[in-house]
Image (cartoon, helix red, strand yellow):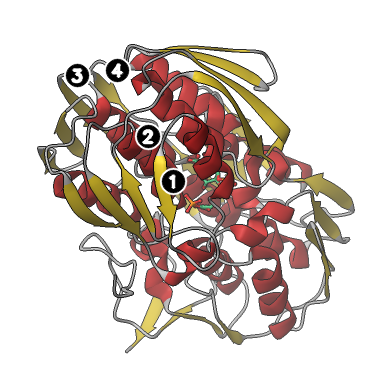
Amino acid sequence: MQQKSSRSPWSEATHFRLAEVMPLDRPVDARLRVPGSKSFTNRAIVIAALAKGESVLSGILKSDDSYWCLDALRRLGVAVSVEEDQVRIQGVQGDWPNKEAQLFIGAAGTIARFLPGALAAGRGGRYVVDGIEQLRKRPLRPLIDALGDLGARITVQGESGGLPLIIEGTGLTGGEIRIEGHVSSQFLSGLLLASPMAAGSVQIQVENGLVQPAYVGITVQLMRQFGAHVEHDDHYRSFVVEPGGYTGQTAVLEADASTACYFLAAAALTQGTVRITNVGYSSFQPDANFIDVLERMGCQCEKTQTYLQVTGPAQLKGGFTVDMKPMSDQAITIAALAPFADAPVRVTNVAHIRHHESDRIAVICTALRKTGIQVEEQEDGFTVYPGEPHGATLDPHDDHRQAMTFALLGLKVPGIKIENPGCVSKTCPMFYEELKKLGVSVKFFE
Ligand SMILES: O=C(O)C1=C[C@@H](OP(=O)(O)O)[C@@H](O)[C@H](O)C1
Ligand SMILES: C=C(OP(=O)(O)O)C(=O)O
């Protein structure tokens, strides 16, 4: 399949070469609602397609990742209709109407890990799954091996041992399966999501630890909400999933806690106040706990069931080490805050983010150095020293979280320019529009 861009019709700002974020001359003061959670959206969409009957999902995220997920279902012959932030899906119980399809999934790690099991569980059919070059490089092997142990027939065509894949709908048997979780929790989530479609009960043992376990909690919660029977121990080391499939539901999805973090961080940086009105501290998403890191840096925080609010201090505090393994999508956000702290900040235990949309550790360290900030790169993290960053043109390597992090630096530092700024549309096409609501001006260059 020819390589394409991961931008979808739900992208914005895609054709701009550069964006310059203008520093704020006053503290931010805003109440914002953030769009739906990527993690909830892509899980619920896949489950709804596998289910018996119709599902109506409200509060979905409309971004590149969810666009490609819905596009894949349409190509499989599933009836899908989107209106505003609601999607209606007619479940096919794994019997995909189209028995051959080429599925392009952009840059979405979730879909790369959730679709193979869903397709292998089908009755007949032969499908090609491919994404952009960076997604081809991301690991898949543990998932493919585990599905193979359940009888899946998946041919790996990618030079790096991942995408493109050819998946045949052989159905899944039950059985005892081992899977690794230390590189990505999504392998386990992908295996779990497919397991209720298997002919027998599936017992799963997780080996070598598990990164970001809260995402597995989201998987289990949604599986149960759609009628699946899944049990596990307290540490997510062993699971039993009974056969029986899913039943279509009407569901309201959580808003995106990861997106919320950039706006909370903007308050932290500018001595301002931001309240995210639709993400609470009890969210299932781990990134809702990023507010604890902001608190540790001296912010005043309100952590309620229904909203999160941050007020930035006159001086951010550093002088600590933080283990970001449980919420590693926010590891690099800290790099935009730490230069303004009163002592170094060390981020540890996130070696796996080198396998995300970019080598996140290498890319953020290069960017900070380009702004004149001293940073030490470690295998599993980085240490940022306080300093006075200067303007620079920064390359996010097509990684939405790098671009959003660079934008935060731009709130404080004149002359921060972001290359290929449209890459935010992987999870937050409206990012620059939301920044404008905070009073930030952004100049785009063709
Ligand atoms: O299951 C999910 O929805 C996710 C799991 C995490 O990935 P890894 O477990 O691969 O780190 C996270 O980084 C990603 O943004 C979303
Ligand atoms: C790691 C991420 O995405 P994914 O793995 O879903 O592509 C992310 O959104 O930060």
Measure how far apart labels 2 and 3 are at the Cα level.
16 Å
Q: Are marks 2 and 3 in contact (CB under 8 Å)?
A: no
The residue at which mark 2 appears reads as 43
SS state under label 1: helix
Between 35 and 52, the one nearer to me in the picture: 52
Label 2 beta carbon within 8 A of ligand 1 = yes
The residue at which mark 1 appears reads as 110
Identify the residue at image location x=33%, y=82%: 16
Between 28 and 190, the one nearer to me in the picture: 190
Label 3 beta carbon within 8 A of ligand 1 = no
Pointer 2 or 1: first along the chain: 2
**Residue 41 seen in render:** no
Under mark 3, the amino acid is Lys
Pointer 2 or 3: first along the chain: 2
Q: Are marks 4 and 3 in contact (CB under 8 Å)?
A: yes
Residue 125 x/y as whole percent: 21, 42
Measure how far apart labels 2 and 1 are at the Cα level.
8 Å
The residue at which mark 3 appears reads as 52
